[in-house]
């Protein structure tokens, strides 16, 4: 199979939300995937606080997988009350969790969510989608790329480690689930 990797636009938000939900519903170990709720996904992408990349199977045109990034607000930047999301949705910064200095937190991007439909697994789509996102984030001047992976999710963990990330900390996140926090520092 051959895939096109492309950056998503706002017109893709419904497809992204649907694909993430489909992957989550089909997972046997749901605790491995902290699927963002559709409101969060719509808000982050709609406000430009994150980006998404999609792998599309060329022959059928079917979306096969998505990858999202999220940009935490820099320290001290406030959101307005009418934004409708809890302040912590925007203030969470994995760089803080692993001990980066406050002065560096504005250089952190979250490698937020990867979801690949079961029929398209084995084609390294998570890796290819992450690479596209990393290249853009590097051009935009981000220095630290952080993500979380459940310690038992060996496939995702191996994929992320093979891309130059390292485990910086293991702790509970997302309502008490264990997660490795991984970081890759861009040069």
Image (tube, rainbow, N blue to C red):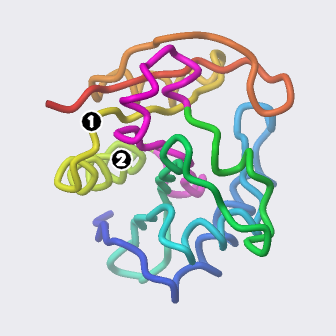
**Nearer to us: label 2 or label 1:** 1
110 in the magenta segment: yes
**Would you place residue 178 above or below residue 69 in this image?**
above
For residue 129, side relative to residue 156 (left or right): left
Label 1's element?
loop
The residue under the point 54% across, 70% down is 45
Disc 2 to disc 1, C-alpha distance: 15 Å
Q: Residues within 10 Å of mark 2 (few under 14, many from 20)?
A: many
> Magenta stretch containing residue 102, yes or no?
yes
User: Which quarter of the picture shows residue 59?
Assistant: bottom left
Residue at the outermost right position? 175
The residue singled out by tag 1 in the image is 143
Q: Nearer the viewer, residue 68 or 57?
A: 68
> Quick one: label 2 or label 1, which is nearer the N terminus?
2
State the residue at coordinates (36%, 30%).
Answer: 104
Residue at x 43% of width, y 81% of height: 9
| Range drawn in magenta | 94-121
Residue 111 screen position, x and y as percent = 46, 43
Which residue is identified by label 2? Answer: 130
| Closer-to-camera residue (3/169) | 169
Q: Are marks 2 and 1 in contact (CB under 8 Å)?
A: no
Q: Which mark is residue 119?
A: none
For the point 54% across and 46% down, the residue is 112
Q: 58 or 151: which is nearer to us?
A: 151
Vertically, is 35 above or below 160?
below
Q: Secondary structure at mark 2?
A: helix
Furthest-bottom residue in this view:
11
Disc 1: CA contacts within 10 A as few (<14), some (14-19) or many (>=20):
some
Q: Position of residue 134 (x, y in %)?
A: 28, 47
Query: Residue 80: horizontal and vertical position, in percent?
Result: 70, 67
């Amino acid at each position: 199979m051959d895939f096109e990797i492309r950056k998503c636009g706002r017109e893709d938000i419904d497809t992204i939300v649907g694909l993430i939900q489909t992957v989550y519903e089909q997972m046997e170990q749901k605790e491995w995937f902290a699927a963002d709720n559709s409101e969060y996904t719509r808000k982050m992408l709609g406000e430009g606080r994150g980006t998404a990349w999609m792998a599309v199977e060329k022959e059928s045109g079917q979306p096969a997988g998505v990858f999202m990034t999220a940009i935490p607000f820099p320290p001290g930047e406030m959101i307005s009350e009418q934004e409708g999301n809890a302040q912590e949705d925007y203030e969470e910064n994995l760089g803080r969790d692993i001990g980066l200095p406050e002065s560096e937190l504005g250089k952190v991007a979250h490698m937020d969510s990867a979801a690949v439909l079961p029929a398209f697994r084995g084609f390294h789509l998570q890796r290819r989608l992450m690479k596209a996102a990393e290249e853009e984030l590097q051009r935009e001047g981000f220095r630290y790329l952080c993500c979380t992976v459940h310690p038992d999710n060996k496939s995702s963990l191996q994929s992320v480690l093979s891309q130059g990330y390292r485990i910086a900390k293991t702790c509970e996140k997302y309502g008490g689930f264990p997660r490795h926090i991984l970081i890759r520092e861009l040069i």
